[in-house]
Amino acid sequence: LGGDCLHFGCVPSKTLIKTAHVYHMMKNAKKFGLPQADVPPADFKQVSKRIKSVIDIIQKHDSEERFCRLGAKVEFGEPKFTDEHTIQLNGKTYSAKNWVIASGSSPATPPIKGLDKTPYITNREIFYLDHLPKSMIILGGGPIGTEMGQAFNRLGTKVFIVDRADQILGKEDKDLADEVMNVMISEGIVFYLNASVEAAKNLGSEKEVIIKDREGKTISLKS
């Protein structure tokens, strides 16, 4: 129990963001009048281990036992509707006036040429990597792409963010989104806005994403 939020969404992402923030502050201690320490490279295995430990703590609140104590019966299996009010599950029949189907979500794969033959990561894998990527190309400058981009950049990954719009965080006011982007640029993130993704290629030791900018110029990004 727990679903996307606990295992692949808000809990691991906010844990990662906190870790990256602390690491960023450690590397910039001098700006706060503190002695500048020699900060070694981040070990993502340890970061991932902490993410899993936070999930384990919260998992107790999403346990079968807790829901049962609250008066909810929990069953596991593959239910099948036999009519609009009845399901069959594990050989038993259950009926109800109304049913709520909460099926969760899964990452959508964009229709990019060659992506089906190019290894890539989504929110299902990004929190459980066994090492920190040297570089990362993020397709989309929405809230998820933006927060993951900053977190990994602060931990030491070279980050490129590509978006087809003329700003990141498309649902926000442009002046506010631009302020966020300028902070991220100052930290080393490279943005490609008004850019379309033309293709992806697996080059073996690295991956290539081919984009086209607003002037129609083709740019190759490798990670």
Image (cartoon, rainbow, N blue to C red):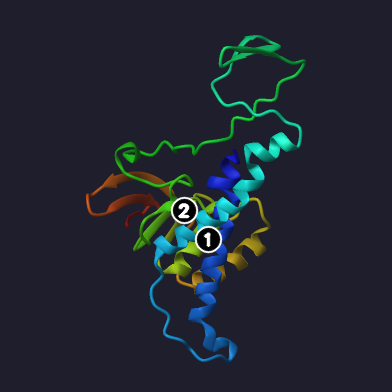
Nearest to the observer: residue 118 or residue 141? 118
Q: Which residue is mark 2?
A: 127
The earlier-in-sequence mark between 2 and 1 is 1
Q: Which residue is mark 1?
A: 16
Circles 2 and 1: CB atoms closer than 8 Å: yes
Amino acid of disc 2: Phe
Dividing the picture into quadrants, the one containing residue 89 is top right
User: Alpha-carbon neighbours of circle 1 within 10 Å: few (<14), some, or many (≥20)?
Assistant: many
Where does the N terminus fall, quadrant-wise? top right
Residue 126 is left or right of residue 8, and the answer is left
Instruction: Name, please, the residue furthest toward the left.
Output: 204
Vertical comparison of 151 with 10: above or below: below
Vertical comparison of 99 with 183: above or below: above
Nearest to the observer: residue 71 or residue 25? 71
Residue 75 at least partly seen: yes
Vertical comparison of 10 with 187: above or below: above
Residue 166 at least partly seen: no
Where does the C terminus fall, quadrant-wise? bottom left
- Find the distance from the CA under tag 2 to the CA under tag 1: 8 Å
Residue 204 location (% of width, % of height): 22, 50
Mark 2: secondary structure: helix
